[in-house]
Image (tube, helix red, strand yellow):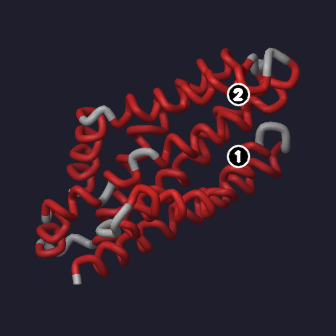
Amino acid sequence: MIGALIMRDLRRAWAGGGVTLVVGFFLLVATLFPFAIGPDAVLLARVGGGVIWAAALLAALLPVERLVGPDADAGMLDQLAVRGVSMATVAAAKIAAHWLSFGPPLMLAAVVAAGLLGLPLDTLLAVELGLLIGTPGLAALAVATSALVTGVRGASAVAGLVMLPLAVPLLIFGAGSIEGGEGAVKLLAAVSLVLLAGAPFVAGAAIRAGMD
């Protein structure tokens, strides 16, 4: 059942162009940033990792409104509940599908962004490691946020207000892991793990509350 839910959400993400939108937005931010601060290669290399992380956070926010809302409106979540499927299980499947749809493509796009920002190879490798560890936490937070704002008027705006403050620790430790060494990577992993562990239950509770 979980595998089928993951594949369904993956097909919808790819068919709906959501992956292209996320990657395109991510690269757009990385492209525009050098124009904003000028052609200072040293400065770009110093702050480029943080730029990539900020772009990744904003890109992960783009599809939030579509992660849970369409299934709730179509009655699919009610059908799964009738069949005895836990909403926490559904949320876990959505987290896995969301990460698979944007995490690996974002890591590939980060190579292009690193070239645009002039990042050295060791910095790029640190950025990729941080994204590998941190993007699952972003996916978990996105699904939980989507479940919380489902049915709310202006859900996309509310989702930003909910998700961005909660994602600040990921952003701080993700950017810090580039030069902060093993300790910063461990902190990033801890935050991501906490989000992965708690988000399915938060999202599941929000979905059940929306059914009442």
What element does badge 2 sit on?
helix
Instruction: Give left or right: position of 127 versus 11.
Output: right
Q: Residue furthest right?
A: 42
> In what quadrant of the picture does the C terminus appear?
bottom left
Callout 1: 10 Å neighbours few (<14), some, many (20+)?
many
Instruction: Give left or right: position of 195 versus 62.
Output: right
Disc 2 target residue: 125
At a point 84% along the width and 38% down the height, the residue shown is 179
Instruction: Give left or right: position of 76 versus 164.
Output: left
At a point 53% along the width and 52% down the height, the residue shown is 138
Instruction: Give left or right: position of 169 versus 181.
Output: left
What element does badge 1 sit on?
helix
Disc 1 target residue: 174
Callout 2: 10 Å neighbours few (<14), some, many (20+)?
some
CA distance for labels 2 and 1:
13 Å
At a point 73% along the width and 33% down the height, the residue shown is 49
Q: In this view, does 181 lie above or below 163?
A: above
The amino acid type of the residue labelled 1 equals Gly
Q: Position of residue 209 (x, y in %)?
A: 31, 81
Where residue 178 sits, quadrant-wise, is top right
The amino acid type of the residue labelled 2 equals Leu
Marks 2, 1: nearer the viewer: 1
Q: Where is residue 191 in the image (x, y as percent from the top left)?
A: 65, 60
Marks 2 and 1, the one that precedes in the sequence: 2
Q: Where is residue 149 in the image (x, y as percent from the top left)?
A: 39, 67
- Residue nearest the observer in this picture, 11 or 211: 211
At a point 28% along the width and 49% down the height, the residue shown is 6
